[in-house]
Amino acid sequence: MSHDAIESFWREERRYPPPPAFAAQANVRDPAVYDEAARDPEAFWAAEARGLEWMTPFTRGLEWDPPFARWFSDGRLNATVSCLDRHVAAGRGGKVAYVWEGEPGDVRVLTYRELLAEVCRCAHALRRLGVAKGDRVTLYMGQVPEAVVAMLACARLGAAHSVVFGGFSPDALRERIRDSQSRVVVTCDGGWRRGQVVPLKANVDAALAGETPVERVLVVRRVGDAAGAVLEPGRDVWWHEALQGAPEAFPPEPMASEDLLFLLYTSGTTGKPKGIVHSTAGYLVGVASTFRWVFDAKPEDVYWCTADVGWVTGHSYVVYGPLANGATSLLYEGAPDWPRRDRFWDLVARHRATILYTAPTAIRTFMRWGEALPAAHDLSSLRLLGSVGEPINPEAWVWYHRHIGGGRCPVVDTWWQTETGAIVIAPLPGLTECRPGSAARPLPGYAAEVVDEEGRPAAAGAGGFLVLTRPWPSMLRGIHGDPERYRTTYWARFPGKYFAGDGCRRDADGHYWLLGRVDDIMLVAGHNISTMEVESALVDHPEVAESAVVGRTDAVKGQAIAAFVTLKGGVEPTPERAEALRRHVAHKLGAIARPDAVYFTAELPKTRSGKIMRRLLRDIAEGRALGDTTTLADPAVVRELRERYEHA
Ligand code: WT7
């Protein structure tokens, strides 16, 4: 598509009016909504749920048999009707659902009408491959429109999808296929990443070698010959052939509210992956409502959530949330530094994106690349910025606000988890005050607390454990095949309360400051110090790009602080610099937080979703054998660190 074509296309696009359900629902621009929701949360959520399309309206609200919740259980619906059919039926079929850009620069536009037709054709194809209501289907794909189509096609016919991020290894894929007992896999021949082909189909072949529950594989031709994919006769079939001639209508399967919509395996920073179970109605209520409150997308908005559909952020805020609201999304296949490090800003500028939702790890990378790159592009279309995935350090928040948002866009920091399904703690932009580094307060309808070791409310300003004290519609319904692990992981630490696993501090004004996973809190000479605070202090130093801090066993202090530091381009790692950084932290946080050791490294070990794997850094700092590294994005990073610091 030429620049002019994109331009006139967006002019057209801005004519479509908002969905009526969207316009008619409770107005969260009024601060009274917090109190109203708190007075009767069930009535509040029921009103939200009525904004979906129901085949059989529900009469029941919450049924709570702790720790097992059911919401709207006597209702029937199909998620795709709220996401697709209702918009087409209301005359908005011509509105764009996705503008997709491939890494090589190819562009595809899918309207709501076209998306619905594709979903129906894919549902027919899946049914012919033997997929039936109640089955699980594993998706192992790149960030292509067919990934969204396949997810919705599963939902259309009543099967659950289990999306496995396309960066995972064959072993990780095999384990997830086995746990979900999928009989069908949907994949691509390959995907584009930094100009290279990711061998998705070959990875599937490796994952299916030996004993497997998988009988059929549906393969999207994304890359073509360069992928070198080989189809196994009788098992594998090309997507374009399977969908050829399939009808563009497929009756939506009526599902009970509590029927499984999808399984999603958590990233495994802490060990064996868990298959998180999400229900149909509650999940959809959660993501549809929170998308509307937090992003408040208007018909003219062009919303871009940069997450891959392989993560929960992709499920909730690339697929179900935006679609339920009839929004227009950008979808991008590739890397932010391809062909140059300004690819994101080029995308924002050309498509006139108005809302950008991305992760702190990406923001810090952009900081490292310098503000000249965004400054060279017209980012004036942006009106709202979002952050998700980790605590955002105030330095990155301010940089994002200033250099990407031009100082005029609110930054909404959104705290939530795969398990919560939807955003839980975040400001309502324009209504709730945003403070750099704080996710503000729980959204209407949620109840959170910060508690101490004994489960008593922590004093204002004191650190503690974040818990959610009331069930919410999009909460996980369990861990696939392991109800006991569900109970012990989330509900046993503080009986009757959902334990999120995160440390948190609530200030006197009720703002929540997330402190990272509690496994990441260090106990240094009797003081609780969060790795996040020390990291934030380090990144505050003008020469530091990124840092990860861990505690290591210390005979005297219990734990001592080890800091892994990435310096900005051109800055040399020297012993003097290490000393200066130690002093800098002591100056900012007090002598107790002074790191005992500073290790310089070109990169930090991260999972493929961008989370720093502190567990591995702890292993390195302790001189232990490394734990499971299968979820690492780049194993070479750890090897190098190891070699350098083995004897430090
Ligand atoms: C964990 C959940 C939720 C989508 C992506 C991650 C951390 C997430 C924030 C935030 C502080 C955050 C927490 C949480 N986290 N967002 N805005 N501020 N921490 O999903 O892989 O299930 O990870 O990510 O530690 O528990 P996930």
Image (cartoon, rainbow, N blue to C red):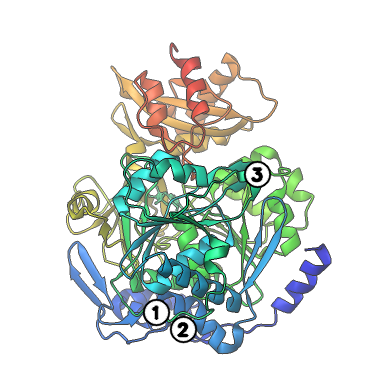
Residue in the image at 50% along x and 84% along y:
86
Q: Quadrant of the N terminus?
A: bottom right
Residue 323: x, y in percent?
52, 72
Residue in the image at 46% along x and 42% along y:
611
Please name the amino acid that badge 1 sits on. Answer: Glu
Callout 3: 10 Å neighbours few (<14), some, many (20+)?
few
- The answer to which of 193 and 47 lies nearer the viewer is 193
Residue bearing mark 1? 48
Q: Is mark 2 within 8 Å of ligand 1?
A: no
Please name the amino acid that badge 3 sits on. Answer: Ala
Callout 2: 10 Å neighbours few (<14), some, many (20+)?
some
Q: Tags 2 and 1 in contact by the CB under 8 Å rule?
A: yes
Residue 586 lies, with reference to residue 90, above or below; the image says above
**Image depth: mark 1 or mark 3 in front:** 3
Q: In which quarter of the image is the C terminus?
A: top left
Q: Residue 226 carries which label?
A: 3
Left/right of residue 348 with respect to residue 87 in the rendered view: right
Left/right of residue 370 with respect to residue 559 in the rendered view: right
- The answer to which of 39 and 547 lies nearer the viewer is 547
Q: How far apart are marks 2 and 1 (CA)?
A: 7 Å
Residue 219: x, y in percent?
52, 56
- The answer to which of 526 and 613 lies nearer the viewer is 613
Report which quarter residue 362 is drawn in: top right
Residue 537: x, y in percent?
51, 35
Residue 379: x, y in percent?
73, 58
Label 3's element? helix
Label 1's element? helix
Residue bearing mark 2? 25
